[in-house]
Image (spheres, coloured by chain):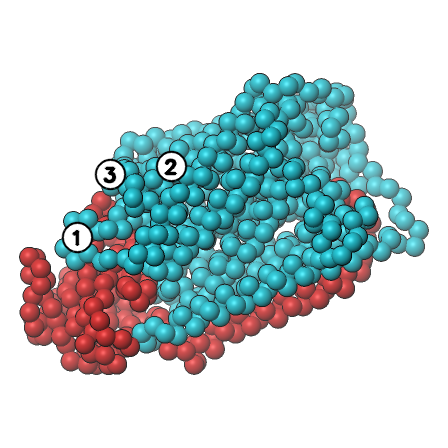
């Protein structure tokens, strides 16, 4: 098939014509979903802020449903499709496989996303992101999700096809890059996930149009979470790949060990899927053996893998910086990092926040017995705003600062704002996560319109600290939304009105990636990374303390057996 | 060269692993095993383990059992809705109904005594959230979840619903006394 390749003069990357257009399409669809989800976030936060309590109950639940679906599914998966295409066609320097199918699937995703949004905004599908039966949404709520998922699944196959094309046409030598390997992990998990989603959403769709009489609630939760949780594991794989990518782009960092990082990804493929059990720990019907094996990813192998990535990414940066001569003390490499470069600062805030706030709390709440302390409290959204927003969204934002010049051939406008944006958004979201988890520790419910229980015959009065935490959630939530809205505005304006940059050389055949000849006597020994190990040990200490504090808390409760 | 390029050494799987990296990997592995062991250990030595004893039931069957206990042990009623306050003897089976939008009935339990709590929902799923203890359990329709509870502190407790159950969700709060 005829196509052209463009070599980007700034990044040296090679973009194939169709792949480039598809990436732009998905990035734009993702940002539009983020825009809708972000406006909904404002409605959610201004209602949960007790002093403001903006929306009436029915609108609040509608807005909350839209916020969950647009953010957790549409924004993230659209963007991930762009990442898959980038990691295959761009990094392997080849044409994309079956561009027509890719375009068809992309439009299918758009149709699905619009259909589900229409169902939500019509007002009779306020069933939350999880759409637990027997609460029923309109048929097009489910059908939209199914179409979106089919589109995403087809693009996963296009990604795999593109790997085959690259191999067959010899566009690279040796093994695929680590970032592509990470994307491959995300793709494999996505295929499992979408299969799980199909198994539950297709019958639920038939139930909504009356062809199936009843869906078992426990079965629904167990299978639905193989979509709901695992889709967040696609994010983990994808944003870890982006951490490696940004470390490579900004510092020229080389993975500390290809073997270790790839093995860690492989552990994700083997074990991340089990995590849907996290949501069933406080449910009846499943045995403790089932709960323990699954919730711990079979002996915490996926947590183990994340702890490895959490060390090897900053470790790779430390090595690269030390090679450049930032060798003083433990932390000169970190102090002298380009903190004003939003791609780096976003990535680093994402890494630290994901580990400390998202990771530690996620493991705590995923312990079988500890889960009872936080199940369905606002601790849960506190946790996943640290993983999905600080972890995934912030990493995507960081990558976008690189993609605007490389992919859209425009200069990023408002560079002064770009410098502070990751801090504004990221740090505000750190605080939002923390105070939500604080309120959740006090028991405040998630998905709840009114913590004052207006109109309830037997209202419960939350302690003052819970109101304080929810007030802070409101204030810092608004700050985060300002940071997020600023980012959207900046990116959209840059894409349309930013200074045009030179596109670079156009070629009709791809430029092949060749490996340098092997170094005689093996590669030079890279510098040691004591700074990173110290950071990792600080992390471990926080982890152990927080973990056992919660067991202590559990031990003070009523006896349960 | 870097993470966005193919590994510079073709035989990357034979490259030695950095010592500090290996140290961290070993620590992380041990910690993973400790956390795995902790959940099992708590089943043997901890006092807060959620029972998994569960039966399929129907709304009618469960409501009838709950009604029988209420008929037998009601001591008074509360609020305008005349919600029965039920004080069953220690050791007995008590049935808590979750429905739109109430927990029914109110139980009056004795401190330090063990009761067998049965949970089920009449319509949607609900969330049993005992405050200020902060014990949270998912409640399903058509499943009867059987849990032995031993209250360890006196006071008035609330049972909040924390699974979204429709427009009146925020009014779904019940009460429980421990004497």
Residue occupying image coordinates x 69% and y 57%:
A532
Q: Nearer the viewer, residue B115 or A404?
A: A404
Which chain identifier belongs to the red chain? Answer: B
The location of residue A16, given as percent across then percent down, is: 68, 27
Q: Quick one: SS at disc 2?
A: helix
Using the numbered discs, state the Cα–Cα distance from disc 1 to disc 3 in whole angstroms: 16 Å
Tell me which chain appears cyan: A
The disc, 1 or 3, on the residue closer to the chain's N-terminal end is 3
Q: CA distance from mark 3 to mark 2?
A: 14 Å
Q: What residue is shown with label 1?
A: A456
Q: Residue A42, labelled with which disc?
A: 2
Front residue of B34/A185: it is B34
**Which picture quadrant has residue A174?**
top right
Rendering quarter of residue A141: top left
| Chain containing mark 1 | A
Label 3 crowd bin: few (<14), some (14–19), many (20+), radius 10 Å: few
Crowding around mark 2 (Cα neighbors within 10 Å: few <14, some 14 to 19, many 20+) is many
Mark 2 and mark 1: Cα distance apart in space: 26 Å
Q: Position of residue A544 (x, y in %)?
A: 54, 68
Q: Is residue A423 visible?
A: yes
Q: Residue at x 18, y 76 (%)?
A: B179
Give the secondary structure at mark 3: loop
Residue A345 coordinates in the image, percent (x, y): 62, 42
| Residue under label 3 | A56
- Chain under numbered label 3: A
Left or right? Give the position of A424 relative to A42: right
């Amino acid at each position: 098939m005829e196509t052209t390749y463009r070599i980007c003069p700034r990044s040296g990357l090679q973009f194939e014509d169709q792949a480039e257009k598809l990436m732009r399409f998905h990035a734009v669809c993702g940002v539009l979903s983020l825009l809708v989800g972000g406006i909904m976030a404002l409605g959610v936060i201004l209602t949960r802020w007790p002093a403001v309590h903006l929306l009436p109950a029915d609108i609040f639940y509608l807005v909350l449903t839209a916020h969950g679906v647009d953010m957790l599914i549409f924004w993230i998966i659209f963007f991930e499709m762009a990442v898959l295409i980038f990691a295959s066609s761009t990094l392997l320097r080849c044409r994309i496989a079956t561009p027509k199918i890719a375009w068809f699937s992309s439009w299918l995703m758009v149709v699905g996303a619009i259909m589900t949004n229409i169902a939500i905004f019509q007002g009779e599908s306020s069933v939350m992101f999880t759409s637990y039966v027997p609460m029923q949404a309109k048929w097009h709520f489910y059908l939209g999700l199914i179409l979106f998922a089919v589109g995403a699944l087809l693009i996963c196959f296009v990604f795999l096809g593109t790997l085959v094309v690259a191999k067959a046409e010899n566009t690279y030598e040796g093994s695929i890059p680590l970032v592509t390997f990470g994307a491959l992990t995300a793709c494999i998990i996505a295929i499992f996930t979408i299969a799980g989603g199909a198994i539950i959403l297709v019958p639920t769709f038939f139930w909504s149009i009356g062809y199936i009489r009843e869906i078992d609630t426990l079965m629904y939760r167990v299978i639905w979470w193989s979509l709901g949780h695992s889709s967040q594991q696609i994010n983990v794989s994808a944003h870890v790949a982006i951490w490696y990518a940004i470390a490579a782009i900004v510092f020229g960092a080389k993975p500390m060990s290809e073997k270790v990082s790839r093995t860690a990804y492989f552990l994700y493929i083997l074990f991340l899927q089990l995590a849907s059990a996290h949501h069933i720990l406080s449910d009846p019907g499943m045995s403790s053996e089932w709960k323990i094996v699954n919730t711990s990813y079979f002996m915490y192998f996926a947590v183990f893998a994340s702890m490895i990535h959490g060390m090897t990414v900053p470790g790779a940066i430390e090595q690269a910086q030390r090679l450049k001569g930032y060798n003083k003390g433990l932390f000169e490499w970190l102090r002298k990092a380009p903190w004003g470069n939003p791609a780096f600062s976003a990535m680093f805030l994402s890494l630290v926040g994901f580990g400390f706030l998202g990771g530690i709390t996620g493991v705590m709440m995923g312990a079988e017995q500890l889960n009872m302390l936080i199940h369905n409290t606002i601790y849960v959204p506190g946790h996943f705003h640290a993983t999905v927003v600080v972890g995934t969204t912030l990493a995507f934002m960081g990558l976008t600062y690189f993609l605007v010049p490389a992919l859209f051939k425009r200069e990023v406008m408002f560079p002064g704002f770009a410098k502070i944006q990751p801090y504004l958004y990221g740090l505000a979201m750190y605080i939002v996560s923390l105070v939500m988890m604080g309120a959740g520790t006090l028991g405040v419910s998630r998905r709840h319109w009114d913590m004052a229980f207006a109109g309830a015959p037997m209202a419960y009065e939350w302690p003052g600290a819970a109101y304080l935490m929810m007030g802070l959630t409101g204030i810092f939530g608004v700050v985060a939304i300002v940071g997020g809205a600023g980012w959207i505005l900046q990116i959209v304006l840059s894409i349309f009105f930013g200074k045009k940059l030179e596109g670079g050389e156009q070629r009709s055949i791809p430029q092949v990636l060749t490996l340098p000849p092997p170094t005689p006597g093996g590669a030079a020994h890279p510098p040691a990374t004591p700074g990173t190990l110290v950071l990792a040990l600080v992390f471990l200490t926080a982890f152990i303390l927080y973990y056992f504090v919660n067991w202590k808390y559990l031990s003070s409760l009523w006896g349960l057996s | 060269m870097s993470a966005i390029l193919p590994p510079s050494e073709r035989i990357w799987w034979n490259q030695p692993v950095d010592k500090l990296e290996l140290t961290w990997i070993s620590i992380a592995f041990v910690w993973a095993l400790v956390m795995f062991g902790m959940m099992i250990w708590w089943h043997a030595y901890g006092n807060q383990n959620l029972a998994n004893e569960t039966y399929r039931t129907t709304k009618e069957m469960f409501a009838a059992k709950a009604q029988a206990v209420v008929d037998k042990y009601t001591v008074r009623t509360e609020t305008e809705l005349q919600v029965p306050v039920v004080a069953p003897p220690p050791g007995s089976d008590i049935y808590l109904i979750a429905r739109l939008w109430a927990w029914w009935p109110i139980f009056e339990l004795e401190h330090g005594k063990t009761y067998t709590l049965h949970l089920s929902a009449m319509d949607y799923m609900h969330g049993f959230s005992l405050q200020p203890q902060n014990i949270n359990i998912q409640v399903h329709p058509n499943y009867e979840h059987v849990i032995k509870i031993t209250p360890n502190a006196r006071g008035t407790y609330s049972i909040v619903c924390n699974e979204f159950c429709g427009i009146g969700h925020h009014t779904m709060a019940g009460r429980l006394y421990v004497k």
